[in-house]
Amino acid sequence: MTDRITLYSMPSSGNSYKLRLMLALLGRPYTHVALEDGTPELDRAKAQGLLPQGKLPALHLDDGTVLVESNAILWFLAQGSDWIPADPLDQARVLAWMFFEQNRHEPVIAGRASLRCYENRRAQATPERMAELLESGHALLAILDQGLAGRDWLVGHAPSLADIALYAYTHSAGSRGGFDMARFPNIAAWCVRMAALPGHIELDHIP
Amino acid sequence: MTDRITLYSMPSSGNSYKLRLMLALLGRPYTHVALEDGTPELDRAKAQGLLPQGKLPALHLDDGTVLVESNAILWFLAQGSDWIPADPLDQARVLAWMFFEQNRHEPVIAGRASLRCYENRRAQATPERMAELLESGHALLAILDQGLAGRDWLVGHAPSLADIALYAYTHSAGSRGGFDMARFPNIAAWCVRMAALPGHIELDHIP
């Protein structure tokens, strides 16, 4: 792919980080428009209609096409690469982890982190809600840890989109979400492998 | 594909219905093991380890492989068919709707329906929670209705997995979820088109 692409993303968010990490690992050039929560730049981009449904991340192609949903954009960027396995069954397994991430993992793991770390969410962080998210988050992380038992990567013998999608919010689940990551040794070892991939970049701090 | 497949599913659930609808539209034979919530058969299947993470639906292949996550199973079943567009951009658009469904639509649309319709969920259906889900559900259905404005199908000029994934919980959002579907004329017309597809089957009633 040689078309120019522009990524509108929130650097401190995991869903946005997935895409910047993918682009870095692919070594693909792109224009980055960084829009943090609560900034006039974000309000302006919304008002200009640059973000469908007002959501980040959004990928703009040269011809005006706009793609949304982080995991769908991952799929678009990785087409034709080894990050999507060719085998039909492995492809379904990769998507199964990606749907698990968006339906179950992200709402809890990213949800608790955002209640702890973003000023404008703190009022909703009641002790009951935080305890509930802690317990369900540990159960979800146990599923991921189990999925990594005896293997280097979530699907097959090489890293895939499943690893990118799950890594985004998992690797900061301890520091941001307050989850007890010492319980999950397979996740810890996998995070070290992910961080060692050539081209790997870090998640930005919350401003 | 000629391999024999066995679908473990809950007939009254939208996530399971997606797969039975897809198999019916593809005209593909399969063995169906129906497991409704709160039955001894479901407890037995869980105890026998037939359902990874205890979740339905699950697809068993002849060689012992088990696939989970309704939208990933849809992808597996539809590979090589017209239900997945060949164009890379349209493929990403289909997945964008499917991730929207699992991350935002299903938790609210199916969530409210299950609180209203399943006996064992009713205690959690507080007036505040139901009002909140009604409002956010109408906003999500408005996004879907807008996505169908001026078009017959969600992506391209033919029905795709995006339509199957979104139809499952949307077509019963009025009767089960109590949403005001009269607000969404594009959804209403699309539901009529979906129901007219050759091979279409209905969602089962809640027992």
Image: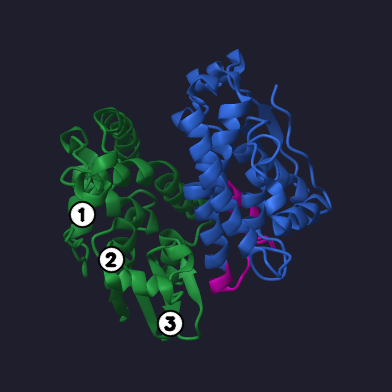
Chain colours: A blue, B green
Question: At 57% from the left edge and 42% from the top edge, which residue is drawn?
Answer: A109
Instruction: Say few, some or many: other residues with alpha carbon within 10 Å of mark 2 (under 14 / 14 to 19 / 20 or more).
Output: many
Mark 2, secondary structure of its residue: helix
Residue highlighted by disc 2 = B21
Residue B193 disc label:
1
Q: Position of residue B96 (x, y in %)?
A: 47, 47
Judging depth in this view, the residue of B37 and A203 nearest the camera is B37
Q: Is residue A110 visible?
A: yes
A137 shown above or below B57:
above
Residue B1 disc label:
3
Query: Which badge, 2 or 1, comes first in the chain's sequence?
Result: 2
Mark 1, secondary structure of its residue: helix
Query: Which badge, 1 or 3, comes first in the chain's sequence?
Result: 3
Q: Which residue lies furthest to the top in this view?
A: A40
The range drawn in magenta is: A72-90
Which residue type carries mark 2? Leu
Question: At 34% from the left edge and 36% from the top edge, which residue is drawn?
Answer: B140
In the displayed structure image, the side of residue A94 where residue A197 appears, left or right: right
Chain letter of disc 3? B
Q: Where is residue A18 in the image (x, y as percent from the top left)?
A: 65, 44
Q: Which of marks 2 and 3 is in front?
A: 2
Instruction: Say few, some or many: other residues with alpha carbon within 10 Å of mark 1 (under 14 / 14 to 19 / 20 or more).
Output: few
A116 shown above or below A140:
above
Q: Where is residue B169 in the image (x, y as percent from the top left)?
A: 28, 50
Do discs 1 and 3 share a chain? yes
Judging depth in this view, the residue of B158 and B124 nearest the camera is B124
Q: Is A79 a magenta residue?
A: yes
